[in-house]
Amino acid sequence: MKTDTEIKVEGTKALIKAMGTVEAERYIALMAREKFDYTKWRKTMLPEGSVQEISKAAIQHRGKATKSKR
């Protein structure tokens, strides 16, 4: 089992890899200052599906967004 610190470090690295440093920091700041119910947020804000399915959809979306900026 991972320690809390290991989970925080791994999560931060994943955010930075997925979003870039600035957006990852903004995301963390937004989540830290808001009171929210994670379970409710998960049900309403994230798409349904497995982690693999959500990841695949995010990668496809990012590819489309990158192409449209060219």
Image: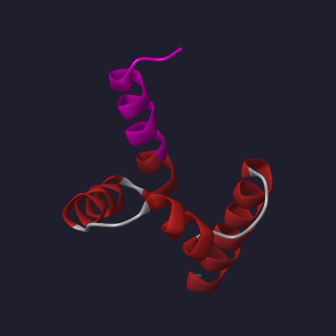
- Residue 35 lies, in percent from the top left, at 27, 66
Left or right, residue 12 beside residue 58: left
Q: Nearer the viewer, residue 26 or 59?
A: 26
Judge whether residue 26 is colored magenta.
no
Judge whether residue 10 is colored magenta.
yes
- Give the magenta-colored segment's residue range: 1-14
- Above or below, 14 relative to 6: below
Q: Nearer the viewer, residue 19 or 53?
A: 53
At 25% from the left edge and 68% from the top edge, which residue is drawn? 34
Residue furthest top in the image: 1
Residue furthest left in the image: 33
Number of callouts: 0
- Residue 43 lies, in percent from the top left, at 61, 69
At 59% from the left edge and 82% from the top edge, which residue is drawn? 70
- Residue 3 lies, in percent from the top left, at 40, 18
Q: Nearer the viewer, residue 51 or 21?
A: 51
- How are the colours assigned in the image? secondary structure
- Above or below, 60 relative to 55: below
- Above or below, 18 relative to 27: above
Left or right, residue 39 beside residue 27: right
At 70% from the left edge and 77% from the top edge, which residue is drawn? 64
- Above or below, 16 relative to 57: above
At 56% from the left edge and 83% from the top edge, which residue is drawn? 69
Most frequent secondary structure within the magenta stretch: helix
